[in-house]
Image: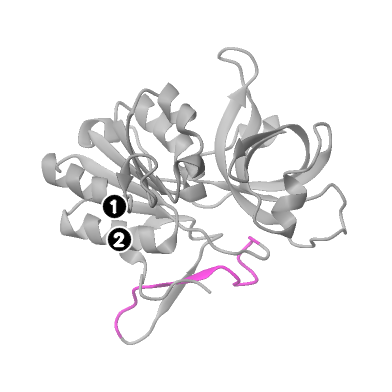
Amino acid sequence: MLDRRVKVKDVQSLGAANYLVTLRSPEQARRVKPGQFLMLKCGEEVDGNPLLRRPFSILDIDHHGRGGSPADIKILVKDVGFGTHKLVHVQPGQELFALGPQGRPFQLAKEMAGEVRTACLVAGGVGIAALYLLAKDLIALGVTPVLFYGARTARELVLRDYFKRLRIRTCYATEDGSMGTRGLVTAPLVRFLKEHHREGVRMYACGPWAMMRETDKLARQFSVPCEVSLEARMGCSLGACMGCVVRTRGDGSSANYIRVCMEGPVISSRLIDWDHPPL
């Protein structure tokens, strides 16, 4: 884990209050695995306001030149509060404090190429950011990703061009019907699971709690292994403050908890007690 001053290279508006922020940090970029996150201080000052850093999934890594070494880290930021509002208004050349990469990544192994044929990536809202690097690594392992991506409106389905460049199958869902299936993203996922052979299929999800709870139900119903990337408010991100604990399935006599920052954010969906969302 590294704590570094990193330079802001670019801030790009994606619409619907979403921004793509690019940070120059080769040392941290070299260590990133799919599913990990950065803790960013949302301003260049050390003791300024807001005091606490914010967690952001690492969307992508840019390399120096074609085939060069990792150089830049891209994150997706939605302008929803005081901290994120400050962050999306930083200027290129400014410096921020970045801690990471942190957290348990998605479990990928070379042997997946022989056991897994298809990966269903299920994203809701800004949860899409946790799945892009995963899709790239799955393709490199010979696994075929299929993206199921839902939001309230078509305008909020950001990063569609990123996944289009990967040339993977995509299934969209919007609550207002402005793109893809009208309704929840789990509807096209159900159709896919019913119409395809499930042997060699895995599921990966990141997004709102209710969406991941429904994804877990489908994973159980169709006997498909599923990992989820949990989103939670964090204080220290070092496992000390317990601000990001999530309840897991205990032995029936007592509840168990994990710290999203340390035992997550990626974890098997079957371990989570979905009836008790984090505060």
Q: Quadrant of residue 131?
A: top left
Residue visible at 73% across and 51% down? 85
What residue span does the magenta drawing correspond to? 237-252
Does residue 166 sit above or below 89 in this rendering?
Answer: above
Count of picture labels: 2
The residue identified by callout 2 is 214
Q: CA distance from mark 2 to mark 1?
A: 7 Å
Residue 22 percent coordinates (x, y) = 68, 33
Q: Secondary structure at mark 1?
A: helix
Mark 1 crowd level (few <14, some 14–19, many ≥20, 10 Å Cα):
many
As rendered, which of 152 and 20 lies closer to the eye? 152
Q: Which callout, 2 or 1, points at the residue further toward the start of the chain?
A: 1
Mark 2 crowd level (few <14, some 14–19, many ≥20, 10 Å Cα):
some
Whether residue 245 appears in magenta in the rendering, the answer is: yes
The residue identified by callout 1 is 186
Left or right for 258, reference 13? left
Does residue 259 sit above or below 87 in this rendering?
Answer: below
- Type of amino acid under label 1: Thr
Does the magenta stretch mainly form a helix, a strand or a loop?
loop
For the residues bearing labels 2 and 1, Cβ distance under 8 angstroms: yes
As rendered, which of 204 and 241 lies closer to the eye? 204
As rendered, which of 234 and 171 lies closer to the eye? 171
Left or right for 190, reference 78? left
Residue 1 seen in the current view: no
- Type of amino acid under label 2: Glu
Left or right for 153, reference 60? left
Residue visible at 39% across and 54% down? 228
Colour scheme shown:
one colour
Of all residues shown, which one is farthest toward the top?
A: 66
Which numbered marker is on residue 225? none
Does residue 104 sit above or below 235 in this rendering?
Answer: above
